[in-house]
Amino acid sequence: MKLSIIDQSPVSEGSTPADALRNTIELAKLADRLGYQRYWIAEHHGMVTLASPAPEILITRVAAETSHIRVGSGGVMLPHYSPMKVAEQFRMLHALYPDRIDLGIGRAPGGTGLETFALMRDRKRHEVADDFPNQMAELLAFLNHSFPSEHPFNRIKLTPAMPGGPEVWMLGSSMWSAAAAAQFGLPYAFAHFIDQRPTRSAIEYYFSHFAPSDYLPKPTAIVALGAICAETNAEAQRLAASSRVLIRHIRRGEPRLVPRPEEALKELESVSDPEPSVMSEFPRYHIGAPQELRDKLIDMASQLHVEELMIVTIVHDHRARMRSYELLAKAFELRPRD
């Protein structure tokens, strides 16, 4: 079983966004040493809780500070950008760090409608057509030098021109993304931590409808989910109170900094329905001591027939977050790197 990390650069109460970015770099270096497969950086706009709106910048620093782990975007929200510009950015990253760069592509806005509007170059159009499939096809053509000979973009020579390229992944949390990944013949990363309801259906659809391509001969999937590990179940549950409250506030449209566990527990005790029930086969967050948590994660991966899980961990204390990933690496017997 491979384990990877998706990092949203969470900002905790009593700290700053700069602290959160430094924490991302420190955690990436630890993940590299522990033997994790990938370290992906999320893209979020206009959220005080999360400090990384530009993963392509943070990827550069994280890749420079690590040696073996694959580093990538989780993901780039393509509707905001020019496919050519994204291709140039990630070809540059590939030239700097060959065979270590992943380009995860998403369709979601990564923010509210207001941020989406502010990111638009042409704001005169109040209703923008969803041309994501065309954008995706254009991005792949730029990356693979595969425009038809009669296409005007065929004359464009992207630089830096290097053999190979970034590994492209389709990201999503819906049946739409599963269908798109299958149609394009791309590896698929399902964001279970965003919406846990369609997980099995999306993964099964992707596997059953996958169209082999020159890029990928057989389907490959990752499930990204939340996990918090501590020496005891009780301590893991205490740490998890912070993320439970954070999710509650985000659902109410009131994102805040990651609260301290004690404050989070008080809030959870004071509300009658701290977590609205969600019909889901698997929980958004798996929480527990190392062996119990390992068994839960392996069971989930086995049921979904995936060989790699990507873990997001949000707790208030950065040291506790580092320790959670250390305990998971040990429980899964990941091979440490020098």
Image (spheres, rainbow, N blue to C red):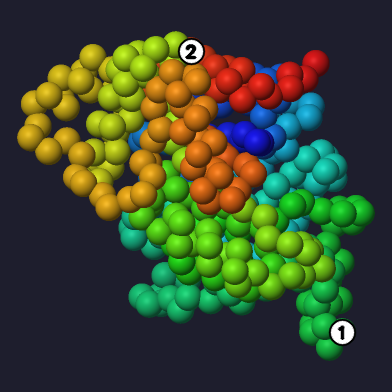
Residue positioned 36% across, 55% down in the render: 197
The quadrant in which the N terminus is found is: top right
- Checking the image for residue 296, the label placed there is none
Does residue 113 show up? Answer: yes
- On the image, the x and y values in percent for residue 50 come to 42, 36
What secondary structure is found at the residue carrying circle 2? Answer: helix
- Say if 147 sits above or below 312 in the image: below
Residue at (36%, 49%) from the top-left corner? 281
* Residue at point 25%, 46% (across, down): 251
Q: Label 1 amino acid?
A: Ser
Q: 94 or 319: nearer the eye?
A: 319
Q: Give the residue at mark 2.
A: 319
Q: Position of residue 307 (x, y in %)?
A: 64, 44
Horizontally, residue 312 falls left or right of residue 37, namely left
Marks 2 and 1 sit apart, C-alpha to C-alpha, by: 54 Å
- What's the residue at 12%, 24% (across, down)? 269
Quadrant into which the C terminus falls: top right
Is 42 rendered above or below residue 230?
Answer: below
Q: Is residue 113 left or right of residue 33?
A: left
Residue 211: which quarter of the image? bottom right
Disc 1: which residue = 149
Q: Position of residue 44 (x, y in %)?
A: 45, 46
Q: Nearer the viewer, residue 248 or 297?
A: 297
Q: Nearer the viewer, residue 32 or 208?
A: 208
Q: Residue furthest bottom?
A: 150
User: Along the polypeptide, which appears first: circle 2 or circle 1?
Assistant: 1
Callout 2: 10 Å neighbours few (<14), some, many (20+)? Answer: few
Amino acid type, label 2: Arg
